[in-house]
Image (cartoon, rainbow, N blue to C red):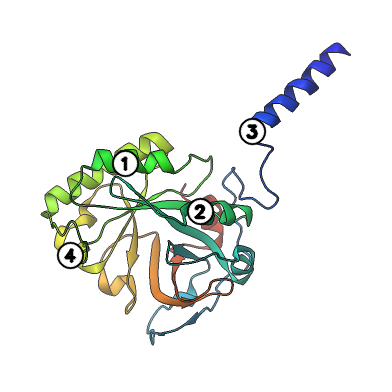
């Protein structure tokens, strides 16, 4: 009897130390990949006349969001067919996106698999940027791989540096290696067509890619590239989201999504 009482008390204390448990509907920590609607057909404020394989032909769709999206009704977005979200977390070595924590918390409560992304700043060392990301984005078992966003930023008020491809690839590898050691899985690298062509970032061995291509299928704009995610529009219209938003597809079946990234 005393043993039973001791075990019950121990379980209670462990639960209390964990902050009261997860919110109802919060994203599973065991890698669950729920898909409420397969092959959704979202609206677009500036639709592209796709030829060949279209975004709708892919089973699993998701968003990427940042400060430019205000509060989102995540349950409505989920029920409309949003099955994952990449959320801007950090930039450089001192900027934290002001909507990161709200988007992170509320997407999790809606049960939507999520990851953070870091916008790379070419005037700061990769090690310092990785440290800043780690300081702001929690570890969670079974979560999606986080993302390194690398693209040119000609409108930056403080840094328009464009290193050559060898330097870019070396810095990217440092960042990815540090995050992999901390989070336990290799991050994804997001990029655009011009950056891909200018830097040969596709040569980075062992890297998963998320590619932007809003006018053609990735096979047309990134010939021969292997990719996991495709950002097909920046002007999408999704229930639960006010205004235009980026929409992406997962390069795989619904079954493959359940065990991604394994």
- Evaluate if marks 2 and 4 touch, with contact meaning CB atoms under 8 Å apart: no
Q: Is residue 239 left or right of residue 187?
A: right
Identify whether 18 is placed above or below 186: above
Residue lying at the far right in this picture: please name it: 1
Point 17% across, 56% down: residue: 159
| Alpha carbon separation for disc pair 3 and 2 | 20 Å
N-terminal label among 3 and 1: 3
Q: Is residue 47 left or right of residue 209?
A: right
Q: Nearer the viewer, mark 3 or mark 2?
A: 3
N-terminal label among 4 and 3: 3
Q: Nearer the viewer, mark 1 or mark 2?
A: 1
Res 185 label: none
For mark 3, what is the residue? 18
| Alpha carbon separation for disc pair 1 and 2 | 19 Å
For mark 2, what is the residue? 114
For mark 1, what is the residue? 130
Point 80% across, 23% down: residue: 8
Identify whether 179 is placed above or below 75: above
Point 53% across, 50% down: residue: 259
Q: Position of residue 38 (x, y in %)?
A: 58, 70
Q: 89 or 139: nearer the eye?
A: 89
Disc 1 element: helix
N-terminal label among 1 and 4: 1
N-terminal label among 3 and 2: 3
| Alpha carbon separation for disc pair 1 and 4 | 25 Å
Q: State the count of labels.
A: 4
């Amino acid at each position: 009897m005393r043993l039973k009482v001791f075990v019950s008390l121990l379980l209670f204390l462990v639960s209390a130390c964990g902050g009261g448990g997860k919110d109802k509907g919060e994203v599973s920590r065991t890698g669950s990949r729920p898909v409420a609607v397969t092959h959704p057909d979202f609206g677009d404020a500036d639709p592209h006349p796709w030829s060949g394989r279209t975004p709708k032909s892919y089973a699993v769709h998701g968003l990427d969001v940042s400060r430019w999206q205000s509060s989102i009704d995540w349950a409505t977005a989920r029920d409309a067919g949003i099955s994952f979200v990449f959320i801007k977390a950090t930039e450089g070595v001192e900027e934290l996106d002001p909507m990161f924590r709200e988007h992170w918390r509320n997407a999790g409560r809606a049960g939507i698999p999520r990851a953070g992304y870091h916008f790379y700043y070419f005037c700061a060392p990769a090690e310092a940027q990785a440290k800043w990301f780690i300081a702001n984005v929690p570890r969670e078992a079974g979560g999606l791989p986080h993302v390194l966003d690398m693209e040119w930023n000609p409108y930056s008020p403080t840094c328009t540096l464009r290193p050559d491809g060898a330097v870019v690839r070396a810095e990217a590898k440092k960042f990815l290696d540090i995050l992999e050691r901390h989070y336990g899985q290799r991050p994804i690298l997001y990029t655009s067509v011009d950056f891909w062509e200018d830097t040969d970032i596709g040569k980075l061995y062992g890297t998963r890619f998320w590619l932007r291509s809003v006018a053609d299928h990735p096979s047309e704009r990134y010939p021969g590239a292997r990719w996991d995610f495709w950002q097909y529009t920046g002007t999408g219209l999704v229930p639960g989201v006010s205004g235009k938003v980026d929409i992406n597809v997962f390069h795989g079946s619904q079954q493959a999504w359940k065990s991604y990234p394994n």
